Image (cartoon, rainbow, N blue to C red):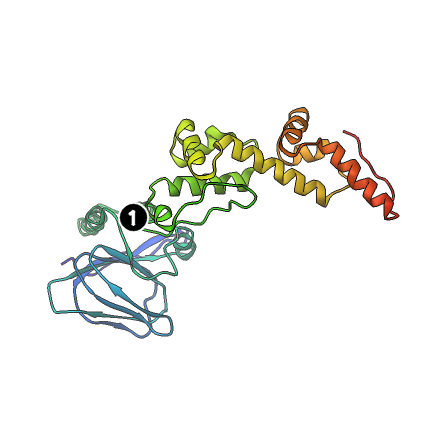
Amino acid sequence: MLAFRLTGLPDSRLPLYLYCIGTHEQKVQLRPEGFPVHQLFLSRSAAGELKIPGKGSWPVGAGQLWVGEPGVAHEFYPHSRTNGELGYIGIGGSSAGSVLQSAGLLGEGPRDLFDFEQFWSRMTDLWHGLDDDKSDIWSTSLIVYQLILDIARSVSTTLEKADLSGVVGVPMSPDQRESDPGNEAFTRAVALMHAHYQDDLLLKHVAEAVGYSVQHLNRLFHQRVGVTGHQYMQRLRLQKASDWLDQHPRASVREAAETVGMEVNYFIRMFKREFGETPGKGIKQRNQSSSEKGEPDVTPTL
């Protein structure tokens, strides 16, 4: 067991710092007033039940992690008096909560941590570094920040659902959605396209961001929605432009093209291929409809 270790006085310039670190044997833990800072708990072999009054209770097993928030009462009841071991890392600083929140580690119960022993080893190395006076508060701040990022990447999380509205795709069964290893890359790729369709975003940029080659990403899209990644992104931009024109009847075709990051002549050509008419014709028809209702004709030019 690693004894409870407090670090030195924190520097006010540090938004994130190591407050304490250690391990203890599996035993009942009752903290009716909570703990002063955020805590990362690593359950190496402990098994039991975590309770947070007013919020719920969760089973805890080996190889899991959970995060305790400061000032929040919590209780841990082990299943037996075995030699289970529970590690903890106290994290202080004005940005501790926001960093953990952004990393997706707050607001959940215990979760599986892949390659658990790697993180246990890193925790013990950090403890020994303090014990040997080889680490100062600045270096440990960097180590803790990197540890949070690596934990966030390794935690088993529920994949976000991709927003595929307006695109006819190939349906997937619930089992396929859960088991397919390409789901995370596909979901992130779609999210990036929806977030940056107005920017100069190329498919190779999306592929790099999700760790795939362009060819592999195109195959992934074709399997799921029946079109390549490039076609999906182009259809998304054209649909967004069409929606924008409906909302801005006095806008020009050039403005619509610029809104979705496309060159105007290419935009007109692709728009006609997708919708069967040029965007200018659609604008004219909308204005004619408005004139019939007594509204002035405001047909724009390029």
Q: Is residue 262 left or right of residue 131?
A: right
State whether residue 241 is above or below residue 272.
below
Relative to residue 252, is residue 64 drawn left or right? left
As drawn, is 175 to the left or to the right of 126? right
Image point (41%, 55%), residue name: 101
In this rendering, does residue 198 appear at all? no
Q: Quadrant of residue 36?
A: bottom left
Image quarter hosting the N terminus: bottom left
Residue found at the very far left of the displayed protein: 82
Quarter of the image where the C terminus is located = top right
Which residue is at a point 36% across and 63% down the rendered structure image?
A: 69
Along the line of sight, the residue nearer the viewer: 236 or 225: 225
Query: Which residue is at 67% across, 39% downward?
Result: 242
Q: Mark 1: which amino acid?
A: Thr
Please provide percent x and percent y for residue 205: 47, 31
Question: Quick check: can you spot residue 132?
Answer: yes
Q: Which residue is mark 1?
A: 140
User: What x and y, as percent, mark residue 232?
Assistant: 52, 35
Judge the density around disc 1: few (<14), some (14-19), many (≥20) Cα neighbours within 10 Å. many
Q: Position of residue 191 (x, y in %)?
A: 49, 43
Question: Looking at the image, which is closer to me, 230 or 34?
Answer: 230
Q: Secondary structure at mark 1?
A: helix
